[in-house]
Amino acid sequence: MDNEKFQKVCHRAKEVMANSDIYFDGHAMPISRQSGVYAKEMFNGSEEVCRLGGLLHDIGYTKNYEPSRGEHIEYGMKVAENILSQAEYESKTIDRVVDCIRTHDNNLELNSPIENIIVHDVDLLASMDQVPMAIELIQRFGDSYDGALERIRADVDKKREWISHPFFREMSNAKYDSFLLNLELMKDYRVE
Ligand SMILES: [Fe+2]
Ligand SMILES: [Fe+2]
């Protein structure tokens, strides 16, 4: 892992990402860290590809992103390629990271590399952990607190089905129970 290059990518990602004050530390970085750890400690995959893939998977949501540009995945692949080549990563690494972006959000294929699977599943699992961040983000777009809780529940119920690897599916069961409990508590205990 080349830490200097990785830092460069972090800084650039934080600059271009929309709502990065919430989304960078609240989503991109945790997915990056966790994916890297699973790659290294559990699956003997590439820590570097997973850390970069986790960091950049949602980079398509840039400050100047417009819905007319189409889906955040396709656009994110281009943005990531730019950022990574500016940081002077080798094209082989860039291709693998960009491919992780392509397959996230339920686009895995039967022969997807383990790095893609890790980034994919860690991202989905995170939706069960990152409720406060999601509430803040959704409220920023004008939804109410209760509306945000409802949207998060629907989002997690959908994403839970997409988790691909048996290891992460197993992990999702306990996480989902605690997510539901947390959601109930957040309905009742709030600052008005
Ligand atoms: Fe995404
Ligand atoms: Fe994500």
Image: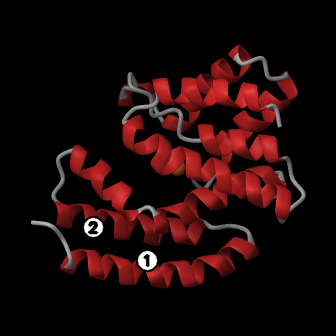
Q: Which is more toward the observer, 142 or 110?
A: 142
| Secondary element at image label 2 | helix
Q: Label 1, label 2: how many angstroms apart (C-alpha)?
A: 11 Å
**Mark 1 within 8 Å of ligand 2, using the beta carbon:** no
Does residue 108 appear in the picture of this structure? Answer: no
Q: Is residue 139 left or right of residue 13?
A: left
Q: Amino acid at mark 2?
A: Leu
Q: Is residue 119 left or right of residue 173?
A: right
Residue 38, how many percent across, how many down?
Answer: 76, 60
Q: Is residue 2 left or right of residue 119?
A: right
Nearer-N-terminus badge (1/2):
2
Residue 66, how many percent across, how many down?
Answer: 36, 26
Residue 175, how many percent across, how many down?
Answer: 54, 78
Q: Amino acid at mark 1?
A: Phe
In the rendering, which numbered label is found on residue 149? 2
Q: Which residue is mark 1?
A: 179
In percent of the image, x 78 and y 17: which residue is there? 88
> Quick one: quadrant of the C terminus?
bottom left
In percent of the image, x 78 and y 41: which residue is there? 49
Decide: is 146 above or below 56: below
